[in-house]
Image (tube, coloured by chain):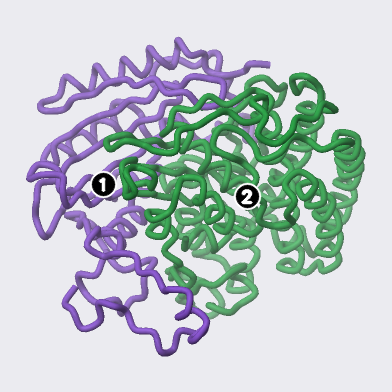
Amino acid sequence: MGPQHPMTHGLWTLKVKVDGETVIDTEPDLGYIHRGVEKICEARDFTQITTYCDRLCYASANTWSHSYIYAVEDLLEVEVPERAEYIRLIAVELQRIASHLMWLGAYGPDTGNLSIMVWCLREREMMMDLLQELSGSRMHYNFPRVGGVKRDLPHGFAQRARAKVSLFLNRIQEYEALFDESTIFLIRTQGVGYAKPEEMVNHGVSGPNLRAGGVNYDVRRAHPYSVYSELDWEPPVERPSIKGADCYDRYRIRIEEMRISALMVLEALEKIPRGADTYHEPGDPAILAKAPSRAPEGTSGFHHFEDSRGESMFYLAGGGEARGKHPYRVSIRSPMFLTIPYASKCMIGYKVADIPAIMGSFDPCIGETDR
Amino acid sequence: MGHIVSTETQRSAAQDLAAAVSEMDGITAEVLERSSGTSPRNVVVVNCPPERWRVLAENLRNTQGVDYCSMITGIHWPEGGPEKNWEVIYHFLRMAVSDPPVIGGMVEPIITDPTKVGGIRVPLEIEVRINLPETREPSVASVQDIWVGADWNEKETWDLVGIDFEGHVGMRRVLQPHETPTGFHPLQKQHKLRYHDFEEMYDDAQGFLRKPSDSGKIK
């Protein structure tokens, strides 16, 4: 199946061995859009790399550039102003909602429900409007800066964000009604593609896929970064069946996550230091700290980050070309790179027709997988 | 608010792990305090000679409860001297995740309260560094059978950096095409990035006439 197949959500091949209609063995084949981002980054300034990180995943650009920025700040030892951390949190959580909406919109057609796609893209547009107000761009934001953010919250942003996020919280109920009462959707997802938490951790699967298995492990909670520890929130957890988490659990967990993210945005708008209505000019020390541009040889920085699809991470070694202005080595940990092989194993024993439902439920993104 | 592992708990857990690992032959470990955003974090950094890596890995997995292999990074240091020509860096997380129990036929989700965890259930970040001597065929023991998550990471590290993993079953190209020439690993430092100048980009936008400046040379 693939590289061109509706199941793949990208460009990769799944080699399937079948016995009649039953899948007995699978092997994924990746690398179709390997662009060599890690090598390119070795010849770029630390500030230039953010742009490349945005392009790792078009559905979740902001989380990737933030993931990189935290690693750079670990490398260069930069202290970020608290207001900037709150703005970043708002941007990342809005992006998480947009990414999950993109997933839900794509998963509907996978499981025989076409109208949900248009509904989800409608709400995703609201999130992208908000992010566009923040960053000036629609898909690839290039929003965070080493030491802070590009711009402060614009005038009236808080009001519009509250209105849109509250409207979105109501609309989630519509999705639930559309999905949870659709017999076709339930038949295709319930009891299909079981995954056990211990097995997932051993295989390197994390994020929503892991929490669907009834474990409340979340990098934002276990290794708190940014200001996640200041907000009042709990990672959502599903109650799986005895065999493990099925596709339906993985759908439920993303619905809950969108809800939690929306509530986090609302809370962060309340708690942001000096209020959400204050505006600082770009470059103001309240939103952007001074950062060195060179990293000496022998230094390294890394940061575990909760991406929309699991734990992402950058490892940076300092002391590259241009007297330390470039990193010597950039290494990217993509959650989907390890999830796709595991998801392929989950399919064994099910029918060929279940493959799109199982693969789609893990939320694959090939841009970040192939890098 | 603040349902997080306290810094003291994390620090003492990190020190416990570092002390336990340091007792092994030839292995040194220390706890580094780094900051992320507003909160400090404690990272265990372990230096391990390549021949002791299997023993350390088994100890980490079976005694210390390190259950999640996050990433494997290979670095080529052509000017690093005879002792450190190649470096392999492993990043682990201790997640302490187990399957939820079944009570009365129903699965009961595990809601861990991070403020109450202790012992080997405290979440930790672990970094293991292995220096490899100067050689044309760097290799280190595979841990594919200990953490399945290391499987594809090792494939990727071999594919891009060219560090081989002894005992790895089913090594193959993952990100590069299958027909890539043997011995070509793009993240080794002898392969330089090439730039095309301004005119070249306009005269030949599709790049059909372009030839790499080092074509014909043995790589």
Between residue B122 and residue A20, name the one nearer to us: B122
Q: In this picture, is A181 found above or below A108?
A: above
Look at the image and tell me whether residue A244 can be seen. no
Q: Quadrant of residue A80?
A: top right
Per the model, the C-alpha gap separating discs 1 and 2 is: 37 Å
Q: Residues within 10 Å of mark 1 (few under 14, many from 20)?
A: many
Secondary structure of the residue carrying numbered label 1: loop
Chain identifier for the green-coloured part of the image = A
Residue at 45%, 49% (x, y): give it: A45
Instruction: Specify the farthest residue to the front.
Output: B199
Q: Is residue B42 above or below residue A108?
A: above
Q: Which residue is mark 2?
A: A142
Tell me the crowding category of disc 2: few under 14, some 14 to 19, or many 20 or more residues within 10 angstroms, Cα based. many
Instruction: Indicate the position of residue B2 as horizontal and vertical percent values.
Output: 63, 16
Q: Secondary structure at mark 2?
A: loop
Q: Amino acid at mark 2?
A: Asn
Q: Which residue does the numbered mark 1 point to in the structure image?
A: B143
In percent of width and height, residue A256 lies at 74, 40
* Chain coloured purple here: B
Relative horizontal placement of residue A355, taking residue B8 as reference (left or right) = right
Observer-nearest of A133 and A339: A133
- Residue at screen point 86% across, 36% down: A155
- Tell me which residue sits at (35%, 69%) in the image: B194
Q: Which mark is residue B46?
A: none
Are dots 1 and 2 on a single chain? no
Residue ID at (74%, 46%): A97
Q: Amino acid at mark 1?
A: Val
Q: Is residue B181 left or right of residue A38?
A: left
Q: Position of residue A318 (x, y in %)?
A: 34, 40
Image quarter of residue B170: bottom left
Whether residue B121 sits left or right of residue A278 in the image: it is: left
